[in-house]
Image: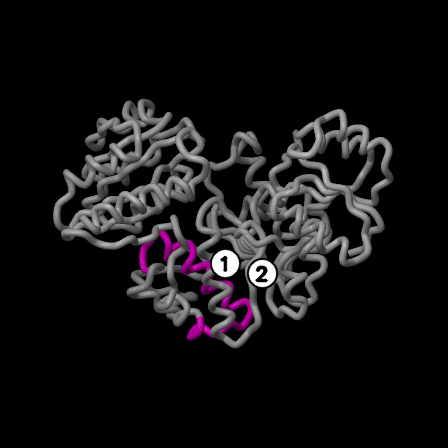
Amino acid sequence: MMKYQTALILGYGRSGRAAEKLLQAEGCVTVVASNDQMDDADFFQTLETADFDVCIVSPGFGLSNPWITAVQKAGLPLLSELELGWSRHNGKTIAVTGSNGKSTAVKWICESLIKDGKMAAIGGNYGIPACEVVVEQPDLQWLVLEVSSFQLETVQEFHADVALVLNVLPNHLDRHETMDCYRRMKARIFGMSKPSRVCLVPASLRVSFEADAAGSRNWVTFGENGDFEYRSGKVFQGLERILNLEGTLFDSPVIGGCTGAAMAALAASIDLSFTAVERAARQFKPLRHRLQRLGEVAGVVFVNDSKATNLSAMAAALGACGSNIHLIAGGLPKESEYTFVKEILAERVRTLYLIGQASQAMFEAWNEVCPCVVCGTLEGAFSNAVKAARIGDTILLSPGCASFDQFGSFEERGECFEKLFNGVEHA
């Protein structure tokens, strides 16, 4: 990808600052535009009076943003920060997207590569911008990117050695509007101008993605009826058992059936040692707020899954946590269709404690299948759950909603749950 003389950077969070550092190291003159630093009038004047080669976009700016519209009208090329960083990487790239489970997948992939003797690092939506990784580790062999649909909106030349879509479930429809549009945005991970070497997809989505992604592709499928399939703690390629995940975090029909099978497909595609993959799985420590087992008090297990901001993620958490679950759910709703999780609620949940803005709608949708208690706050829900839980039960925070009605982020919500747990643990 070409080098630039002048660049406009939209957004000055961590990704914007990382892009600025990379570009300035190449001798590029940069101008930053962020809502914190200028209003619309200042931005439009800057765009009219300056001559830029490119506009680097942070993922917080959607295509409908008026600043993006103005940039496009001016004929200025848009480039994702992710693509800028990727273009400066001299090694190989694995790109992972999906509605749920991306961060856990890239962590497992990176740790497996390292255990197999490779130099690998994570970047992208995981929290470390791609530009930052390539500046700090220029000799990296493997760049493992967590990629969001927001980052994919403006990619043009981006393609990976291995592109993996874990799943496509209802999410971010406030930005992408329909599931078809959302799926097509995910399909951009397979490369626009040049295809990725290997495209890993759930077997159930192959036909859709073949239609979404133009040109010939090397498709490899995983999941039910896929090339790689999870069965009872193990992953098979056809009739051959190639990965044993028994006793690990990935030993469940939900996580194993998706991430476990996908990991086996990826390892086979790049000749990554299955022994290294298994070792990484057995030593895997879950990320905070993602099916994080906080501990056990008086025979009751406490699990923090605050990152579950949609109902599909909540259902996956229930599938991974067994039965006799006291579920804390609710918050700022991202969906209006609640019926598809009724079956797993009926199977797994003893009592459901509802918080936040979605409480009443969830109560009306689910009270017929499991006992529901409207608690309002996380503190109230936690207190009720602790009083009701018995030996062998699990108290699970898996909200199925965004956090912004009561918290600044899902991390803040999870930290509140952790503090409440620590109070019980040390009581």
Residue 251 on image: x %, y %: 32, 60
Numbered range of the magenta stretch: 251-276
The x and y percentages for residue 395 are 24, 44
Q: Amino acid at mark 1?
A: Val
Callout 1–callout 2 Cβ contact below 8 Å: yes
Which residue corresponds to the image point at 41% horizontal and 60% vertical from the top-left?
Answer: 260
Residue at disc 1, secondary structure: helix
What is the spatial separation of the Cα atoms under label 1 and label 2, in whole angstroms? Answer: 9 Å
222, 333: nearer the viewer: 333
In magenta stretch: residue 412: no
Q: Which residue is mark 2?
A: 94
Residue sitting nearer the eye, 32 or 202: 32
SS label for mark 2? strand
For the N terminus, the quadrant is: bottom right
Q: Is the magenta region chiefly helix, strand or loop?
A: helix
In the displayed structure, 134 sits above or below 191; it is below
- Model colouring: one colour
Which amino acid type corresponds to the residue marked 2 in the rendered image? Ile
Number of callouts in the render?
Answer: 2
Task: Using the image as rendered, state which of residue 377 and residue 365 is in the foreground.
Answer: 377
Q: Which mark is residue 86?
A: none
